Image (cartoon, rainbow, N blue to C red):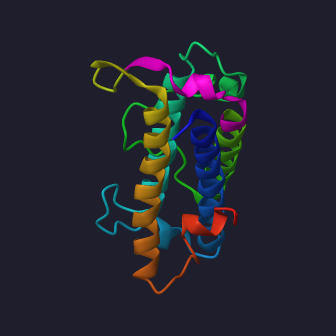
Amino acid sequence: MDNQALKNHIALLAHYNQQMNRSIFTVLSKLDAPEISKDRGAFFGSIIGTLNHILVGDIIWLKRFTMHPANFSSLKPVKELTLPASLSDIIHPDIAPLDVARKTMDTVLISFTEEAREADYNMPLAYANTKGKTFKKNFAGLVLHLFNHQTHHRGQVSTLLNQQGIDIGNTDLLTLIPEI
């Protein structure tokens, strides 16, 4: 994949991410808080736990991305956020403030993908994980991981909702891929 194709693909993932989050949060706005908070045996227990985990992952990764030599101005709002203590932190126990935080994060992600240049994706990024172990990896791979992580856990939320007979609609990335 050439650099422009990679940049376009990452931007597509940011828009897909936003669309899927809107679908999920639209459905969740119609459910009672106990249903959203009920432990359903998922990796992070409940729907609200799983959605908080996605946000926690975004914060952790985007804070790491602020160390990129490109010094992305679009990530400035993330610098101001508190680093979560664990991957299971419940930053927002209620759906309304979580929805606001998710919308903000999705806007940051889209702005980031618009700002990042093709050459930025080819650079390495040095970072430490939550246990303090250091790594140096290809930045594009890390950005793709961020979006894959979101998709993985949104799939869990989609399954939890489906088990209750709730359909969030079409979840295929294919719907956003432009016709040639």
Q: Which residue shows up at 68% across the image and 23% down it?
A: 76
Number of numbered tags placed on the structure image: 0
Instruction: Note whether 78 is above or below 88 in the view shown.
Output: above
Residue 62: quarter of image: top right
From the image, which quarter does the C terminus lie in? bottom right
Q: Nearer the viewer, residue 109 or 4?
A: 4
Instruction: Note whether 28 is above or below 19 in the view shown.
Output: below
Residue 18: quarter of image: bottom right
Q: Position of residue 159 (x, y in %)?
A: 40, 73
Q: Position of residue 2 (x, y in %)?
A: 56, 37
Q: Is residue 132 left or right of residue 142?
A: left
**118 falls in the magenta region:** yes
Outermost residue on the bottom side: it is 165
Q: Nearer the viewer, residue 130 or 61?
A: 61
Instruction: Note whether 178 is above or below 8 in the view shown.
Output: below
Q: Is residue 143 left or right of residue 71?
A: left
Q: Position of residue 59 (x, y in %)?
A: 52, 34
Q: Which residues are magenta?
A: 113-127
**117 falls in the magenta region:** yes
Q: Which residue shows up at 46% across the image and 56% down it?
A: 151
Q: Is residue 88 left or right of residue 95?
A: left
Q: Which residue shows up at 59% across the image and 28% down it?
A: 81
